[in-house]
Amino acid sequence: MKMLVPSFFALLLTASVSAPALAQEAAPMLGAAKILRTVPAREATQGVANDPRFLYAIENSTIGKYDRRTGQRVGLWSGDRRVFIHINSCETRGNELVCAMSNYPNVPMWSSVEWFDTKTMHHIRSHSFGPGRGSLTWIDWHDGSWWACFANYDGDGGETPRDHRSTLLVRMDPHFVPQEQWLFPEDVLDSFGHHSASGGHWGKDGRLYVTGHDAPSLYALALPDAGGRLIHVGTYDLPTHGQAFDWDALSSHHLWTIDRQKTILVESSLPSQ
């Protein structure tokens, strides 16, 4: 019996070392996006949205509407900064622009969804989430549900004891009633740094694609078969640094991002997989 004890503990030690190593296998790099076009837009500091005719540049309490063919600004909405504090991202649905807003970096954090008429650029309605989960940074309609990201932060704009690791993806029904929620992959959270997920959209391939605040990366994620944490499938290199993005309305594998330092909208193509 004395000979078996060391062997038993040696086996346990081997298992404890190898199991985490397998769990921490890095997600693959999927290639780099290639810039196709840039459009100057003075409001391009938070994100971009598009439809078949227009591009929309987002800046907190201002949204610029640009003709996608000529690049000329053809419309503008500007709201009361005391009310429209931090519009972070938008997407188009029919003739409406659906935008995620919060009071970042103020606390306690509250969030809302704001709708705009894309023809007139008038604000038309609102849905308030109030405080509780974090700051709404993006929302996407997919497969009969709303998918919303409630960001949490380290330091300014955050609420202890939560930090950026508490960022949540929440699936809601059409009336914004929560159905499920997930945490983000740990390696993606590490890449976010002290900030969080600034942009997100489901892709036609059934993956969820997310950008952070600073890193020039587009993360491909998947829902887990079990448990409450998303799976990191792979990462694309982007020519711009984080912020909210949008899939191009006319071309598959194309997306729009922003360069907030240059205040430009950037159309890029992803490599085919």
Image (spheres, rainbow, N blue to C red):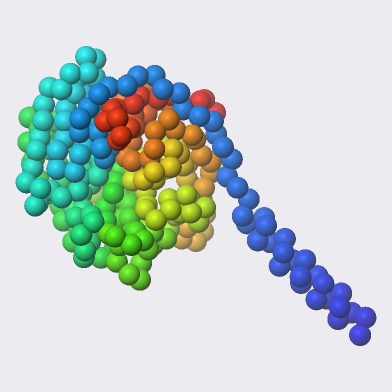
In the image, farthest residue toward the top: 70
Screen quadrant of the C terminus: top right
Measured as percent of width and height from the top left, residue 1 is found at 91, 85
Q: Which of 213 and 210 is in front in this view?
A: 213
Give the quarter of the image for residue 11: bottom right
Give the quarter of the image for residue 266: top left
Residue ID at (15%, 22%): 73
Q: Is residue 203 above or below residue 35?
A: below
Whether residue 2 sits left or right of residue 28 in the image: it is: right
Residue ID at (89%, 79%): 4
Measured as percent of width and height from the top left, residue 117 is found at 11, 34
In the image, farthest residue toward the bottom: 1
Tally of marks: 0
Residue 51 can be seen, yes or no = no
Q: In this view, does 37 lie above or below 181?
A: above
Measured as percent of width and height from the top left, residue 252 is found at 40, 24
Residue 73 can be seen, yes or no = yes
Measured as percent of width and height from the top left, residue 212 is found at 39, 45
In the image, farthest residue toward the front: 261
Residue ID at (39%, 33%): 240
Residue ID at (20%, 39%): 59
Whether residue 202 sits left or right of residue 172 in the image: it is: right
Whether residue 215 sits left or right of residue 25 in the image: it is: left
